[in-house]
Amino acid sequence: MSNPRHHAPCNGDILEDPSNRCSTAEGAAPTALLRTMLRSVVRGIQEWRQTRRAERELLAMDDRHLADIGISRSDIASAVRHKHREVASVYPEDS
């Protein structure tokens, strides 16, 4: 007698082969969770790199140029990290 709880190992992409045991809730949920977590980590790294790049560019400017855009050297980190709120208020969304 075969054991109904025994499953064959996953052998392919769960999206391509719906008969694959990995496509059940038992295998798909952890895979989907892992994909979601990986995407989140990648997005976080991309946002961090973009923030650091913007911060480096502003730090490379002299104080006169910074004053022209309305920030001081001591405001750079805060301005870069809170860019979403400030940009949203300065540049309203296109309708």
Image: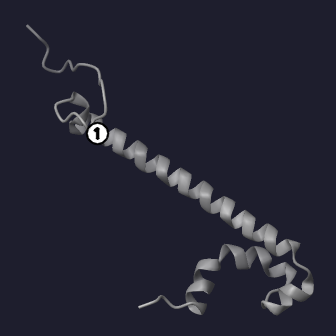
How far across and down, in percent of the image, does residue 67 sit?
Answer: 85, 90
Which residue reaches farthest top? 1
Identify the residue shown where x is 30% and y is 42%.
29
Figure quadrant of residue 50: bottom right
- Front in this rendered view, residue 1 or 16: 16
Query: Does residue 32 sit above or below 82 in this rendering?
Result: above
Q: Which residue is mark 1?
A: 28
- Name the quadrant of the C terminus: bottom left
Q: Is residue 2 left or right of residue 68?
A: left
Figure quadrant of residue 82: bottom right
Identify the element where label 1 is drawn: helix
Identify the residue shown where x is 54% and y is 57%.
43
- Name the quadrant of the N terminus: top left
- Front in this rendered view, residue 13 or 86: 13
How far across and down, in percent of the image, does residue 27 sit?
Answer: 28, 34
How far across and down, in percent of the image, does residue 45 sit?
Answer: 61, 54
Query: Does residue 19 sit above or below 41 in this rendering?
Result: above
How far across and down, in percent of the image, does residue 31 sit?
Answer: 35, 39
Q: Is residue 91 left or right of residue 12?
A: right
Identify the residue shown where x is 73% and y is 63%.
52
Q: How many marks can you see?
A: 1
Identify the residue shown where x is 25% and y is 37%.
16
The amino acid pointed to by label 1 is: Ala
The crowd level at tag 1 (other Cα within 10 Å; few <14, some 14-19, many 20+) is: some
- Front in this rendered view, residue 12 or 22: 12
Q: Is residue 49 left or right of residue 3?
A: right
Query: Does residue 51 sit above or below 74 in this rendering?
Result: above
